[in-house]
């Protein structure tokens, strides 16, 4: 049956503006983003409730009066889902489900993003990461919300280590059995993901031996990273005009202007209020960014909140402890820019980028300039050193000419003396030959 034949789930969106807080996006803009997330998840937002508060209500997040307003909106629209734009505490979740009754589903922004990730995870690694994030989110919230997330679990579907059948011991409640089963499943998922991390580590070691630099694409979701990857490398990658269209990292090879090769990798897009459980679960994937020699921060130049998007990206990079490697700011979709190129947005941290390049990944505008900026950034990241390579290791001399920037070569009694600039990740490999 075609997916369009299913009746679309309808939801009421709830946004709260906490006085004194300084969110990256205004409540209105954040709710607009929430509606895009809902659409990506297959839901339709048919109503919206907003509230300005001095403090969050301890029981229901929004207070009894606003709860009654939400109830009226549910009755008036026939919607059966309430979608909060902020993460609800386990207590808020329980109180609201009790107030709204069994027929109404209560979801927060984190649960919605987890749903989308579950729908879009294509590989085993992606499914494992999403399932772990869901279970860790779910553990303190064991109410009837379990049923909703169980159907979305990335390959787990609520299974436990004993096949999903929890056997109760003396005096155990079903809730305790469920918690025990989830903890067991979380342990197994972490173990599986550790194997994934080890596998990635072996691949990284092999890549480092070749000396081919790694360039990571990062950016707010739907900034055009996958389109840019395809434009730069000719890769056949999935592209869609929706949030979180791709989750699994894709790495392809490209030629730089000098003829030197580089690997470009595209990873999951970022978004404001990204669930911490999701960031933790995706560590194996995000390590690709941490190992990059250059980072391309891709931004949709036309988006009204592009500067806030950049701040979200930088905050997320700081959260996962990305080292201070050169970063190039890529203003994408410049073919749709209405103003003068001299009037491009000006981020507060502009000095943190070694270059800013305006491109259009769909129209192939500015790509050569971008690759040139990447090469310049790679050279800036090189460290000058001297190596004495024995004559019998001519293979290493050839490798260094291909992958490093050799400034001078001399033939001495002890071997070939090279004065060169070496990428950071190659210093350890050649430390035995340092002069």
Image: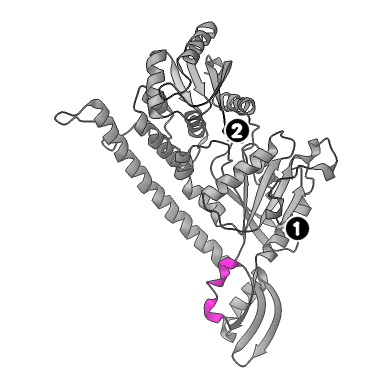
Q: CA distance from mark 1 to mark 2?
A: 30 Å
- Residue 145: image location, x then y, percent: 39, 24
Disc 2 packing (10 Å; few <14; some 14–19; many ≥20): many
Magenta-span inclusion, residue 384: no
Residue 298 seen in the figure = yes
Q: Residue at x 44, y 39 (%)?
A: 277
Magenta-span inclusion, residue 425: yes
Residue 122, numbered label: none
Task: Examine the image and state in which quarter residue 15 appears.
Answer: top right
Which secondary structure lies at badge 2? loop
Residue 2 seen in the figure = no
Camera-side residue: 111 or 215? Answer: 111
Q: Residue at x 24, y 31 (%)?
A: 177
Camera-side residue: 344 or 212? Answer: 344
Q: Which residues are magenta?
A: 424-435
Question: How has the structure been colored for display?
Answer: one colour
**Left of 287 or right of it: where is 353?**
right
Residue topped by disc 2: 243
Q: In the rendered view, would you say 415 is above or below 257? A: below
Residue 372, numbered label: 1
- Residue 302: image location, x then y, percent: 75, 36
Q: Quadrant of the C terminus?
A: bottom right
Q: In the rendered view, would you say 55 is above or below 279? A: above
- Residue 197: image location, x then y, percent: 44, 53
Q: In the rendered view, would you say 282 is above or below 176? A: below
Asked whether the beta carbons under mark 1 and mark 2 sit within 8 Å of each other, the answer is no
The residue most toward the left is 170
Which secondary structure lies at badge 1? helix
- Residue 193: image location, x then y, percent: 41, 47
């Amino acid at each position: 049956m075609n997916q369009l034949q299913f009746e679309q789930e309808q939801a009421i969106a709830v946004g709260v503006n906490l006085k004194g807080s300084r969110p990256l996006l205004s409540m209105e803009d954040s709710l607009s983003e929430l509606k895009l997330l809902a659409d990506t998840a297959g839901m339709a937002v048919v109503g919206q409730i907003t509230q300005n508060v001095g403090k969050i209500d301890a029981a229901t997040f929004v207070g009894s009066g606003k709860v009654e307003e939400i109830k009226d909106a549910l009755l008036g629209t026939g919607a059966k889902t309430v979608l909060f734009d902020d993460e609800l505490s386990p207590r808020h979740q329980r109180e609201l489900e009790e107030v709204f009754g069994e027929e109404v589903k209560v979801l927060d922004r984190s649960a919605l993003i987890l749903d989308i990730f579950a729908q879009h995870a294509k590989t085993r690694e992606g499914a494992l990461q999403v399932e772990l994030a869901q279970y860790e989110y779910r553990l303190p919230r064991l109410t009837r919300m379990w049923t909703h997330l169980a159907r979305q679990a990335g390959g787990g579907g609520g299974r436990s280590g004993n096949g999903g059948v929890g056997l109760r011991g003396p005096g155990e409640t079903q809730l305790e059995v469920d918690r025990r089963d989830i903890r067991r499943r979380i342990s197994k998922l972490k173990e599986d993901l550790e194997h994934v991390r080890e596998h990635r580590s072996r691949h990284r070691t092999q890549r480092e031996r070749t000396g081919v630099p790694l360039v990571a694409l990062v950016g707010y979701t739907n900034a055009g990273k996958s389109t840019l990857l395809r434009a730069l490398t000719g890769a056949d990658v999935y592209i869609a005009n929706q949030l979180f269209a791709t989750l699994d990292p894709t790495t392809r090879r490209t030629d730089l202007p000098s003829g030197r090769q580089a690997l470009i990798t595209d990873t999951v897009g970022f978004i404001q209020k990204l669930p911490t459980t999701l960031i933790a679960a995706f560590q194996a994937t995000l390590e690709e960014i941490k190992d990059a020699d250059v980072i391309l921060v891709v931004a949709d130049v036309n988006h009204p909140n592009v500067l806030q998007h950049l701040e979200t990206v930088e905050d997320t990079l700081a959260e996962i402890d990305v080292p201070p490697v050169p970063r190039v700011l890529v203003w994408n979709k410049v073919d749709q820019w209405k103003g003068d190129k001299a009037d491009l947005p000006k981020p507060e941290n502009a000095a943190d980028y070694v270059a800013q390049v305006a491109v259009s990944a769909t129209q192939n505008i500015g790509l050569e300039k971008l690759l040139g900026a990447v090469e310049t950034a790679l050279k800036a990241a090189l460290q000058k050193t001297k190596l004495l390579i024995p004559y019998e290791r001519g293979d290493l001399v050839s490798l260094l000419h291909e992958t490093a920037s050799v400034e001078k070569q001399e033939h001495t009694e002890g071997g070939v003396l090279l004065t060169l600039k070496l990428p950071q990740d190659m210093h350890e490999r050649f430390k035995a030959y340092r002069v």
